[in-house]
Amino acid sequence: MADDPTEMPPANLILQALHAIRTEVRDGFVRTNEQLGQTNSRIDQTNARLEQTNERLENLRFFTVNKLTELNTKLDGTNERIDRLTDRFDNFISGEGAKLVKRVDALEGQVQQLLARQPH
């Protein structure tokens, strides 16, 4: 009955137990390494997607900065134009416009005088 494990000498049982433990530990390491490999693969895929996202964000930032610069340039041009028109209007009001107002006032005065002389 030497084939029955319960009747083996204690040294053989210990060796068998140690061998079984070593096999289990080695299989555990193999499984863990496989899982780590899968995890690393997923991390690499995630990093690649993040790189693409970062590139798209950088392109969007560049596009936005260019559009804002163009808009600011247009606004500066518009503001300059408004300033020129304001200056022209101010010059008109203080120059020719003031003369026209005086002439209209004088004409209104003449019309009032003419109306006052007419019989009713």
Image: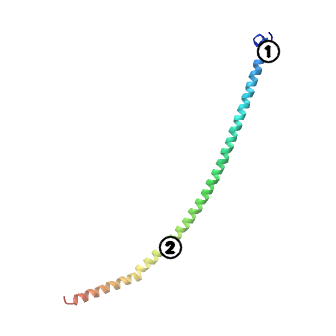
Please report contact status of discs 2 and 1: CB closer than 8 Å, yes or no.
Answer: no
The image shows residue 48, relative to residue 26, as above or below, that is below
Q: Residue at x 64, y 48 (%)?
A: 50
Nearest the camera: 29 or 116?
29
The image shows residue 116, relative to residue 35, as above or below, that is below
Which quarter of the rendering shows the N terminus?
top right
Label 1, residues with CA under 10 Å away: few <14, some 14-19, many ≥20: few
Question: Residue 9, image x and y in percent?
Answer: 79, 11
Q: Is residue 66 left or right of residue 4?
A: left
Three-letter code, disc 1: Asn
| Residue farthest to the left, as pictured | 120
Label count reads 2
Which quarter of the rendering shows the C terminus?
bottom left
Label 2, residues with CA under 10 Å away: few <14, some 14-19, many ≥20: few
- Of badges 2 and 1, nearer the viewer stands 1
In what element is the residue under mark 1? Answer: helix
Q: Which residue is mark 2?
A: 81
Q: Which residue is mark 1?
A: 12
| Residue farthest to the right, as pictured | 2
Residue 30: image quadrant is: top right
Question: Residue 36, image x and y in percent?
Answer: 70, 36
Q: Which mark is residue 26?
A: none
Q: Residue at x 38, y 81 (%)?
A: 98
Question: Residue 54, image x and y in percent?
Answer: 63, 51
Three-letter code, disc 2: Arg
Spatial separation of the CA atoms under disc 2 and disc 1: 102 Å
**Mark 2 vs mark 1: which is more N-terminal?**
1
Q: Residue at x 31, y 86 (%)?
A: 107
Q: Residue at x 28, y 87 (%)?
A: 111
The image shows residue 108, relative to residue 74, as above or below, that is below
In what element is the residue under mark 2? Answer: helix
Nearest the camera: 106 or 11?
11
